[in-house]
Amino acid sequence: MLCVRSISDRPAVLLGLGALLAVAAFHLWITPSNPPGYHRDEAALSLNAYTVSTGLRDEDGARLPLFFRSFEDYKSPLYPYLLAGVFRITGPDAQVARAFSAVLVLAAVLLLGLLARRLTGRNLIAVIAVVVAGVTPWLFELGRIAIEASTQPLLIVLLLLSLERTSRLERYGVTQGLVAGALVGLLTYSYTGSRLLGPLFAGALVVFAGRSRWRFVIAAWAAFLVALVPMGVYAIRHPGALTARYEATTIARAGGGRACYLGARSRDGSRCRGAGAARVLCPQVHDEWPTENGRFEADIPQLLDQAWADGGTVYIDYDDLEPQTLARWYALVKGIDQSRVVRLDDGGIPPTATIAFGRTQECDYICTRLDESGDYWIARVEGPKSG
């Protein structure tokens, strides 16, 4: 009671606690409409997290993969493995996955306040840091979507807290170096961009420690290099896999200077690829863009519900990857047997009068479009082309 009274007698403390609670509520307020739908990258990561949680394999059957192949890209492992642990308890659920991202980002925001408190010794600065970080759009948006980048802010703040403690206590020993190096290693496995950020942080540790603290630096770099060994082996066994995203999002492309959204196609049929809503240069793109990526692909469940109506099965071209993942994910969360999502063989034709689902591939058979969302479509199969 005395503690409660002492707090209530200090308005500044109450305001600070109110601000912290408001930031927490702001980040943990998860709604299905913000953003609408479940983007293909979210579906891919969640699907892989579920398959790992149940059988220790990814969606393609690889056992405990180091990186997850998805849409000709390779997703970093930290987030899907952590989410697998959550799904092991809750089962597959989009809102659970997004809530997990929100918790990761909120933890980063709150720990950033702790870092500010340690650096300045002032509670007011800590509260201001939490509020500013809490309303920063980039951080807030990371907590709204189930993607691998959600782990990155937390790892960076944990690294900074570790270094602050090392500096404050002036303990630049082997243990502190190993902790810092391990955190940099984890950061490198958190997100595609962190494969560049990790080595930069490792180099910054040399500047942080200075010349005379060589034990700290050697321990940190040893831990970091050990963490990189699996990645190096993977890169050798899968040439180009870990640089696929960088090659896809570069602006250094031949041709004209028009920009296009992810999913747009040039006149020769090649796809212009990019990350999220980022624009990349693409030669001779169409004047018609996908409709805001189909409102974050919010209408995909309605398309698939039409395909699955009356016990139906949906058929998808063998290399139309995004529809395959989305169909498998929605079948999973709707309790529909995976046998009702059929990936056709190369050149395969679905049975007549069944439903096909696609995005980047046109029908190799006679079909009638029934509905569309953005550049996704469902169609009734009329039969093979004559001749």
Image (spheres, rainbow, N blue to C red):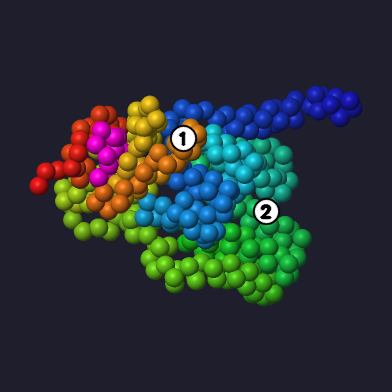
Amino acid carrying mark 1 in the image: Ile
Residue in the image at 25% along x and 45% along y: 349
Residue sitting farthest toward the right: 2
Residue sitting farthest toward the left: 387
Range of the magenta residues? 349-360
Q: Is residue 9 above or below residue 221?
A: above
Task: Please name whichever residue, 70 or 135, is drawn nearer the observer in this view of the structure.
Answer: 70
Task: Please name whichever residue, 207 or 47, is drawn nearer the observer in this view of the structure.
Answer: 47
Residue in the image at 59% along x and 39% along y: 91
Secondary element under disc 1, as helix, strand or loop, is loop
Residue in the image at 72% along x and 49% along y: 118
Tell me the residue that label 2 is attached to.
161
Q: Is residue 311 above or below residue 72?
A: above
Position in image of residue 32 (x %, y %): 49, 28
Amino acid carrying mark 2 in the image: Leu
Position in image of residue 17 (x %, y %): 71, 30
Secondary element under disc 2, as helix, strand or loop, is helix
> Label 1 crowding class (10 Å Cα cut-off): few <14, some 14-19, many 20+?
some
Measure the C-alpha gap from mark 2 to mark 1. Answer: 46 Å
